[in-house]
Amino acid sequence: MIPRRRLGHELRRLREAAGLQLVDAARRLECSPSKVSRLENGQGLPKLRDVRDLLDLYDVRDHRLRTRLQNLATASQDEGWWSDHPEAWPPNLGSYISLESAASGMQWFSGFAISGLFQIPEYCREIFRNNYPSAPDSEIDQLVEIRGRRQRYVLDRLGDLSVTAVIDECALHRVVHSQGAMRRQLASLLDVAEHDRVDLRIFPYSNGYNLGIQCNYVIFTFDNDTDQDTVYQELSGGDRFSAQESEVKKYQDIFTNLLSKCPDQKSSLDLIGKVLRTNYE
């Protein structure tokens, strides 16, 4: 979704800069103007050959720009690796992964469980097993595999992506799967937090109630003018996305307030270590 939208934005900009109409581009591609319009709106699946022809038509000679746009066309073809997913998976999976795979920043709050991005397989499997009790083991295995693939992709992007995560302290104490799994889960949290692009905070019991802990949510931010910052809310009645500026700002303000009431990262990691030693060793 996002690679296609970015590619379409660039193709429209280049066509207009070249002083050409949709019909001119369509003539070059030997197609209808509506097809070119769909490509520019991020709705059509771009073929690499068509993108090359349009770049030639628009007299784009910048090698780096040509390479970047052709890479976007290739990435657009790769979108949807998750499409063959279990029926139990939420229908908005594609939108979520598209945002997750392209954002420059993520602000993540998780209240009742460890954030999905940081879950180890045992912990993750138990969560899915409880969320989808009637699903066969094969589907649960597939759900765990998909989440693991997402985790690897996001962690591989940490050079370009920054993650700020707040986890409520209750998630550290709630035993998911087993004592041994919790020991490994908290140890994994400490390992992930060593990355300089991850800011992990714990909202402690001692800080009482905060508006920010009413539901799990993620704020996706982008460092370009093409993509809109978006908030995702994980609600019991159904997940919800919003790119409305006022809604995103509301959650950014809530998250900023929540973060300001958390101890710093070192103190948060010390708290994780204390719970690990006290509860799970």
Image (cartoon, grey):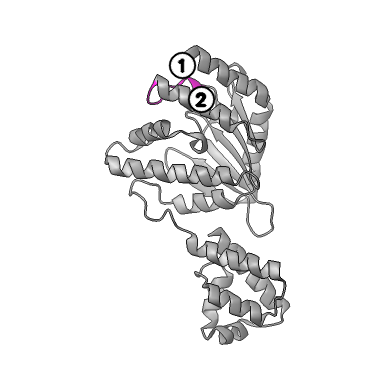
Q: Earlier in the sequence, mark 1 or mark 2?
A: 2
212 or 19, nearer to the observer:
19
Q: Badges 1 and 2: C-beta atoms under 8 Å apart? A: yes
Q: Residues within 10 Å of mark 2 (few under 14, many from 20)?
A: many
Q: Mark 1 falls on what kind of element?
A: loop
Residue placed most toward the observer, 247 or 226: 226
Where in the figure is residue 17, as x and y percent of width and height?
Answer: 73, 76
Residue picked out by circle 2: 186
Residue at image location 62% in from the left, 45% down from the top: 248
Taking 226 as reference, is 127 left or right? left
Q: Residue at x 59, y 85 (%)?
A: 23
Residue drawn at (51%, 44%) of the image: 152
Q: Is residue 23 above or below residue 203?
A: below
Q: What segment carries the magenta color?
A: 170-178
Element carrying mark 2? helix
Q: Amino acid at mark 2?
A: Leu
Please say if 3 is above or below 146: below
Horizontal and vertical percent position of residue 94: 46, 53
Rounded to the nearest whole Å, what is the CA distance between mark 1 and mark 2?
9 Å
| Residue that extends furthest to the top in the rendered view of this protein | 278
Query: At which x and y percent is residue 273?
Result: 57, 19
* Residue 208 appears anywhere in the view: no
Count of numbered marks:
2
Please, what is the three-letter code of the amino acid marked with disc 1? Tyr
Q: Is residue 259 found inside the magenta-colored segment of the image?
A: no
Residue in front for this viewpoint, 247 or 149: 149
Residue depicted at x 59% and y 25%: 202
Residue 12 position by quadrant? bottom right
According to the picture, the residue beneath numbered tag 1 turns out to be 280
Q: Residue 14, position in %: x, y?
A: 68, 74
